[in-house]
Amino acid sequence: MPKNSKVTQREHSSEHVTESVADLLAHEEPVDYKRSVLNMTGDTWDKQKDGEEDLDAENRPAWNSKLQYILAQIGYSVGLGNVWRFPYLCQKNGGGAYLVPYLVLLVIIGLPLFFLELAVGQRIRRGSIGVWNYICPRLGGIGYASCLVCFFVGLYYNVIIGWSIFYFFKSFQYPLPWSECPLVKNGSVAVVETECEKSSATTYFWYRETLDISNSISESGGLNWKMTVCLLVAWSLVGLAMIKGIQSSGKVMYFSSLFPYVVLVCFLVRGLLLRGAVDGIMHMFTPKLDKMLDPQVWREAATQVFFALGLGFGGVIAFSSYNKQDNNCHFDATLVSFINFFTSVLATLVVFAVLGFKANIMNEKCVVENAEKILGYLNTNVLSHDLIPPHVNFSHLTAKDYNEMYRVIMTVKEGHFKELGLDPCLLEDELNKSVQGTGLAFIAFTEAMTHFPASPFWSVMFFLMLINLGLGSMIGTMSGITTPIIDTFKVRKEVFTVCSCIFAFLVGLIFVQRSGNYFVTMFDDYSATLPLTVVVILENIAVAWIYGTNKFMQELTEMLGFRPYQFYYYTWKYVSPICMAVLMTASIIQLGVSPPGYSAWIREEAAEKFLFYPSWAMAILISLIILASLPLPLVFILRQFHLVSDGSNALSVTYKKGRMMKDISNLEDNDETRFILSKVPSETPSPMPTHRSYLGPGSNSPMEMSSAPNGRYGSGYLLASTPESEL
């Protein structure tokens, strides 16, 4: 018994010591209701099963170090979106001005909800299914919905890793295979491939050499064997990283989390030395303040915050469930959230330094091509030599000289200017060409790297970085599936991991057809956004309004050793739910306003064309949203009408030696005086509530109808031999 307890103080002191029920119950001898007369459920005690549960609770795997855990959370939250989504949104939504709504929403939505997921995972020490079954059994569908969304996201996310693997191995040659258009023989003459000539070398390599893409989603075209092999390699890497749980994935994180930062810093240093890099960065961070008043900017910033931190997937909960109970998860939440933000800013600097260099290259190319047109017009007397300023030297024509010449010609030949077909060749126009996603990574960035000295080296580094970024996120996504399933159904970790990877690979073959890229777009746009928004709203409500914010704050105080700021109390209870509800409404409106479609690559035109999904594809799209959301109402109905057991009617009065869960944490200080034991026995209130008989699964017990503080199970105490006992 602790030396500072009130009971021990009474033994060594003659002074009067007043004890509370909490003090007395904390030192009770262990009692197991299944072995005692308190067992009113009719269940028999299985000694072997009980021992296994205790052993599982005490032998739960743990991170080897705090650093390993932080790197795992960083690796999970920092993904491909930081490299190719955030820079695009920053450019599209006002440059530096976009950082303001992003930071505001990170603080009032991202950080509180990220802290909430870390806290519940660490407190309950289970995956998403176990956590939400414990907090509110009727909302236990949250955990199953998270698993389904993780499965959908993992299916297509690993395809992107497969694409990166393909480019990685293609980078070991000089010149890079996407640096020039291929030649085809037309009889005895070699001519440039028409599709490549109409587009560009990097665009052709992406759509034709890599994807061999069909003209629409309706044209399957069969499997692309190169991408099939790369997908198999990607799932093999994920399986090997996950096979031993955090013992194997934790070690992988040392490399997969840190290596991208090495590459980003190297690219930033190299990028800043490139001609035109400053133009790109200045363009990036020049604020367009009027954009801050656009609601669409705030909606996109909220969505990016939401997905950047991996909220709702279950990976955050899974990783934190392997922590020690006294870990400072508030510090972890703050650290990871802002590392994620600064990584996005770092990636944005790199992207726009390189794109600034590319814009200068493309602008110079434009100037040369149009200067040749002007020379042709001068030689054929279409244009007069008097229109050319005397200081202009065509052999060393600068962009400034060309722009001056362009304005003069446009003024003089105003009526026939369009017939000349001259382009303005403005650097600003090149910088405004926004690209994101695969267009940024596999077209724009690869094209820029072809102009680097030692371009194969930089290409290898870039795609190895993408592989590691993707792998870190995939490990977190797969943990969102494996951890709750293994915790709940007690399956073997190695067997389940291997089987799930094989199954995911087989299902994922739909993404390596010639039309597979269109399915990737469909899953990326619709399989996760709306279901995850609903999941996070229900997570927030379950903790703040059903479990109780006061109670949760008190438990955090006991776990962390200090009380979290009141800021979290108000954000959890009011601000975050309202903001998430607005985001969900905006997402639904956006789905209704923007007709579902995709950008198809038309081979004959060598250009992208927006197409609407056919009816069968729309059916798949709607099914994805419904299937991901289905566990939420299904589990609620089954447990609301007692069609399946949720454990809420069982009288949990089991104690484990030295540990017990005291469910009085939501009492105010002045309320505890009701439980103080006086010296007069007749004045001593009984610690056990009256009339707590078990009425069976089909009945409403007095426990459920009572106003006891514990609204989840209706019993005053939650004991440690249940899976929730790790509290």
Image: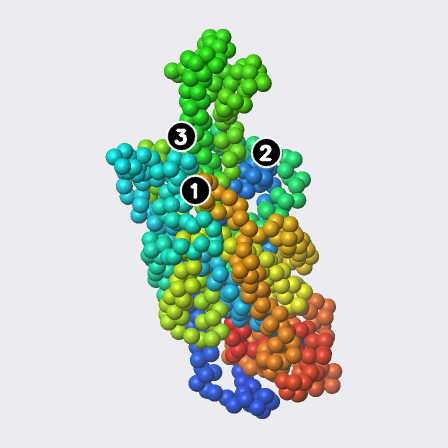
Q: Is residue 132 above or below residue 235?
A: below
Q: Amino acid at mark 3?
A: Leu
Query: Of callouts 3 and 1, which one flags the residue occurring earlier in the amino acid sequence?
Result: 3
Left/right of residue 3 with respect to residue 380 in the rendered view: right
Q: Is residue 511 above or below residue 610?
A: below
Q: Which mark is residue 287?
A: 2
Q: Amino acid at mark 2?
A: Pro
Q: Is residue 472 above or below residue 3?
A: above
Q: Residues within 10 Å of mark 2 (few under 14, many from 20)?
A: some
Image position, residue 61 (x, y; %) = 42, 68
Left/right of residue 692 with respect to residue 516 in the rendered view: right
Q: Are marks 2 and 1 in contact (CB under 8 Å)?
A: no
Kind of element beneath mark 3 = loop
- Residue linked to disc 1: 604
Judging depth in this view, the residue of 335 and 629 nearest the camera is 629
Q: Residues within 10 Å of mark 3 (few under 14, many from 20)?
A: some
Q: Residue at x 57, y 69 (%)?
A: 631
Kind of element beneath mark 1 = loop
Q: Amino acid at mark 1?
A: Glu
Q: Residue at x 42, y 17 (%)?
A: 376
Kind of element beneath mark 2 = loop
Q: Residue furthest right?
A: 683
Q: Is residue 350 above or below residue 622?
A: above
Image position, residue 415 (x, y; %) = 58, 18
Judging depth in this view, the residue of 224 and 427 nearest the camera is 224
Q: Residues within 10 Å of mark 1 (few under 14, many from 20)?
A: few
Q: Quadrant of residue 373?
A: top left
**Is any atom of residue 415 visible in this view?**
yes
Q: Residue at x 38, y 45 (%)?
A: 208
